[in-house]
Image (spheres, helix red, strand yellow):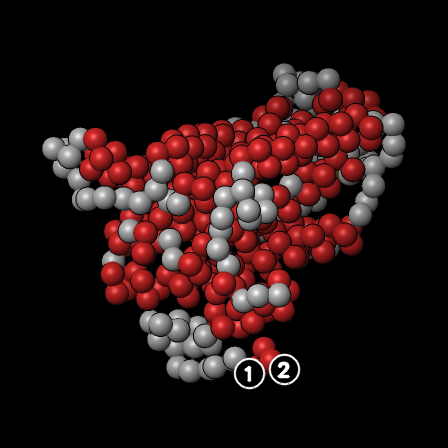
């Protein structure tokens, strides 16, 4: 009932883009959970939980130890289904991502409208306000919760790809460096990432329910678009910082808030993401051929029609193709709908 008292519905405006003023509601809910309102939160290194490099690195190392150790242990056991738990996990993450996204939008809309984009990404009073820091920190914590994605793959005995394992660990580290480095541009990659995660975890939720969707490829496309935009902003902010600090005679737009190590970490990790996701996209969706087909079968993304004989399936597994049941020059021909997609 106390939370309902802070609900204030008005006509949508720049200051209240959703009509309902969301921050007071969030502030009240945060207070119920934490015992103090979000307005009183302060991120303090070595005081706030998981605010040191040692803590962050320890959790990331533990993540890799658990998933690779768990994979070795699971080799002696049958795969677990965990369908309901997996659905709840993905539904929770798409919900959390959506809530954080709308809270970011509410905070950013008046700032960007009244002061402009450069102020928002380079001025500490624009991209590093107290409410924004609360959201940055909560987003940072979700990166450790998202590590459970890989745990599900392990217990379900699904393949672990380099991209998946690297991306999860590196993202937790990336968010840590930007939080410690007070980079005002942080909201750009974070909000884009939250939008992609709303879509991505919703897809995983639907897939776990057995629902087919047609836009699976768009998840990877959105991720690639996200990284391209991220790098444009991060490189610009880094250029602005370094030129204004060390080479003021070079044309620049002025000062830009943030620490140097955070700039290097952001540029390096996000650049690696773009390269890896483009490579993944072309390998999975564009190149086709035997390698992509074998990966799709191994990952359970393609179901083989039961009328195929085991000899035919073994032929594919050994790298031989078939046409009408006979081996050919390494290519597989789809006839009469015999190979069908189980997932979108």
Along the viewing direction, whichever of 211 and 84 lies nearer the viewer = 84
Most extreme residue toward the left, as rendered?
Answer: 249
Relative vertical location of residue 203 with respect to residue 178 in this rendering, above or below:
below
Q: Is residue 25 visible?
A: yes
Question: Is residue 68 shown left or right of residue 274?
Answer: right
Q: Residue at x 52, y 80 (%)?
A: 7
Residue 297 horizontal/vertical position (percent): 70, 32
Helix, strand or loop under label 2: loop
For the residues bearing labels 2 and 1, Cβ distance under 8 angstroms: yes
Mark 1 residue element:
helix
Mark 1 surroundings: few (<14), some (14-19) or many (≥20) residues within 10 A: few
Q: Rounded to the nearest whole Å, what is the CA distance between mark 2 and mark 1?
A: 7 Å
Q: Nearer the viewer, residue 251 or 192?
A: 251
Residue at 69%, 52% in the rendered image: 89
Q: Position of residue 119 (x, y in %)?
A: 26, 54
Mark 2 closeness class: few <14, some 14–19, many ≥20 residues within 10 Å: few
Q: Position of residue 143 (x, y in %)?
A: 58, 45
Tell whether 182 sits left or right of 282. left
The relative height of residue 173 versus residue 100 in the rendered view (above or below) is above
Give the image location of residue 54, x and y in percent: 57, 33
Residue 225 showing in the rendered view:
no
Q: Which residue is mark 2?
A: 1
Residue at x 42% of width, y 66% of height: 106
Q: Where is mark 1, residue-wise?
A: 5
Left/right of residue 254 with respect to residue 135 in the rendered view: left
Q: Which residue occupies the extreme right position in the image? A: 77
Task: Please tell me which residue lies in front, 305 or 197.
Answer: 197
């Amino acid at each position: 009932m106390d939370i309902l008292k802070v609900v204030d519905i008005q006509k949508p405006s720049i200051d209240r883009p959703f009509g309902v003023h969301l921050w007071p509601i969030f502030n009240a809910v945060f207070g119920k959970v934490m015992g103090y309102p979000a307005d009183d939160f302060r991120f303090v290194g070595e005081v706030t939980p998981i605010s040191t490099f040692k803590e962050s690195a320890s959790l990331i190392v533990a993540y890799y130890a658990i998933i690779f150790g768990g994979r070795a242990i699971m080799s002696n056991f049958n795969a677990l289904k965990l369908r309901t738990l997996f659905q709840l996990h993905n539904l929770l993450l798409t919900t959390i991502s959506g809530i954080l996204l709308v809270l970011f939008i509410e905070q950013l809309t008046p700032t960007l409208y009244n002061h402009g984009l450069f102020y928002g990404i380079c001025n500490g009073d624009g991209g590093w306000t107290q409410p924004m820091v609360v959201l940055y920190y909560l987003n940072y914590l979700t990166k450790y919760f998202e590590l459970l994605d890989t745990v599900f793959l392990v217990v379900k005995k699904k393949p672990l790809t380099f991209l998946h394992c690297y991306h999860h660990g590196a993202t937790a580290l990336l968010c840590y460096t930007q939080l410690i480095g007070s980079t005002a541009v942080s909201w750009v990659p974070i909000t884009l990432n939250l939008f992609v995660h709303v879509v991505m975890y919703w897809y995983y939720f639907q897939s776990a329910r057995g629902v087919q969707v047609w836009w699976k490829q768009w998840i990877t496309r959105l991720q690639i678009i996200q990284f391209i935009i991220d790098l444009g902003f991060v490189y610009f902010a880094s250029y602005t910082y370094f030129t204004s600090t060390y080479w003021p005679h070079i044309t620049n737009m002025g000062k830009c808030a943030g620490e140097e190590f955070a700039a290097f970490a952001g540029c390096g990790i996000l650049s690696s993401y773009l390269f890896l996701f483009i490579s993944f996209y072309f390998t999975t969706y564009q190149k086709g051929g035997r390698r992509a087909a074998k990966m799709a079968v191994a990952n359970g993304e393609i179901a083989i029609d039961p009328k195929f004989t085991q000899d035919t399936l073994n032929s594919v597994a050994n790298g031989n193709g078939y046409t009408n049941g006979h081996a050919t020059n390494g290519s597989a021909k789809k006839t009469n709908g015999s190979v069908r997609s189980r997932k979108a």
